[in-house]
Image (spheres, rainbow, N blue to C red):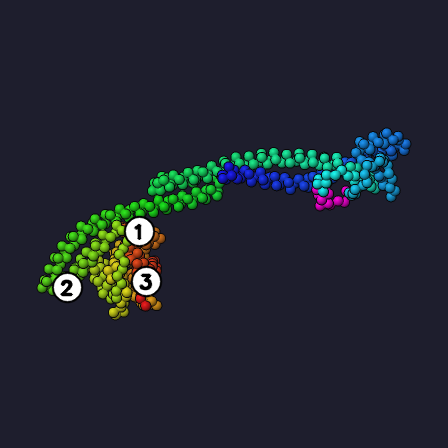
Amino acid sequence: MLNSLSGRFLVLTIIFVMLAEILIFVPSIARFREDYLLSRLERGQIASLALLADDMIDADLEEELLRNAEVFNVVLRRDEARQLILSAPMPKPIYATYDLRNASAFVLIRDATARLFDTEDRVIRVIGNPVREAGLLIEVSMETGPLRAAMIDYGLRILLLSAVISVFTAVLLFLAVQLLLVRPIKRVVGDIQAYAANPEDAHRIIQPSASVSELREAEDALQKLETQLTSALKQKERLAQLGSAVAKISHDLRNILTSAQLFTDRIEMSEDPTVKRMAPKLVGSISRAVKLCETTLAFSKAEEPAPRLTKVKLNEIIEDVFEAEQLTRSDGEISFVDDLPQNFTVDADSEQLYRVISNLVRNARQALETANQSGEVRVSATNIQNAVEIRVSDTGPGLPEKARKHLFEAFHGGARKGGSGLGLAIAAELIRGHGGALILERSDQEGTSFLIRLSQAK
């Protein structure tokens, strides 16, 4: 029971209610003692009226009046004269005097507590104001035994009533907690367990239904988490399937390109000037395709090969990329601008850097062609402290808002319409392998600019 939320709530409720009743009990027992003493003053005043009405009463009547008032004597002060109205022999000397006329709450609580813990029967004097202003002062002498017994009886009744209230309140709160909190929490736990059994099943994602705002917020957060996790798991599965398919295609394509490479070797021997000029480009393209297929066969391992860093002439890579794009571009007026210093070198893997820049330049060209507008694709580079910044920019229409949100995430919509969403994700991964970063600097109606930041050896 103590291991459950509702059980602990039940026990704590009983404890707290009892503590509250104890805090109420102390002033309550003090108030009871005050009322008890005041009632004895009133009885003593009533008993004294018989003597005031008839100055001569016998001893038996006087004893009966004092016995009914439960006091030993009654003293009235009228017109500054103190007068003993009724009296009887006292068994003990007066132990203490208590003045109720201006007693504070603290004094009443202190005296009541002391009386409860004092087990000896004593005789006390009590002073108060007469009822209805029948004099200036009235005092009586009485025993404390009956007072303490009445206080104990009253306290036990209060404690019993408090216990009943505590248990009744705790049971009601227990049922309320079970209905309003424990059941919804158990339902959420059940939904979590069901989802954990098959997280790829979108039908098992929790549907928020709690009426308690805090639980509803927890369910909303859990629904968002499960939705994202299910999407991520499906994406991982898709990547695994894609890796298997690409590995098979790359294996066969590599064999075909190997044969094509043999033919291009023969073409290089041609005496035709045009063929001689185009043959090296064709050989280079086929060689890259063969090497790409070989590295793609490692895709099933879900990782790119580590970059082989060498001193690379960036001008030559940009020249190759521009020539390839100029051969494949449409009739639109698109210019390619190489804004690099002469003999600009970087520490990088030439093949991987070529793939990244080629992808960015191709995306820029296709964006301009899709928009049916002329424009410019520019590549520039600068040296900064222990790094190189390569900037690929265009004057195209810019990227849509949806593409910018998930630009470097696979399968979340490509940078261009119809794109697979893989190109920039792969490019970003390749640059991270160099210890650098691929950043979208800007993208608006005036164009798009990507920044490649590469760390350089000191």
Residue 260 appears at what percent x and percent y? 14, 55
Residue 308 in the image: above or below residue 170: below
Residue annotated with mark 1: 410
Q: Main secondary structure of the magenta part?
A: helix
Q: Name the element at disc 1.
A: loop
Residue at x 15%, y 52% (from the top left corner)? 256
Q: How many marks?
A: 3
The mark closer to the camera, 2 or 1, is 1
Separation of residues labelled 2 and 3 (CA atoms)? 34 Å
Decide which of tag 3 and tag 1 comes sooner along the chain: 1
Residue 345 percent coordinates (x, y): 27, 67
Q: In this rendering, would 132 be left or right of 382?
A: right
Q: Quadrant of residue 290?
A: bottom left
Q: Is residue 104 magenta?
A: yes
Q: Amino acid at mark 1?
A: Ala
Looking at marks 2 and 3 on the same chain, the residue that comes earlier in the sequence is marked by: 2
Element under label 3? strand
**Residue identifier under label 2:** 277
For disc 3, the marked residue is: 453
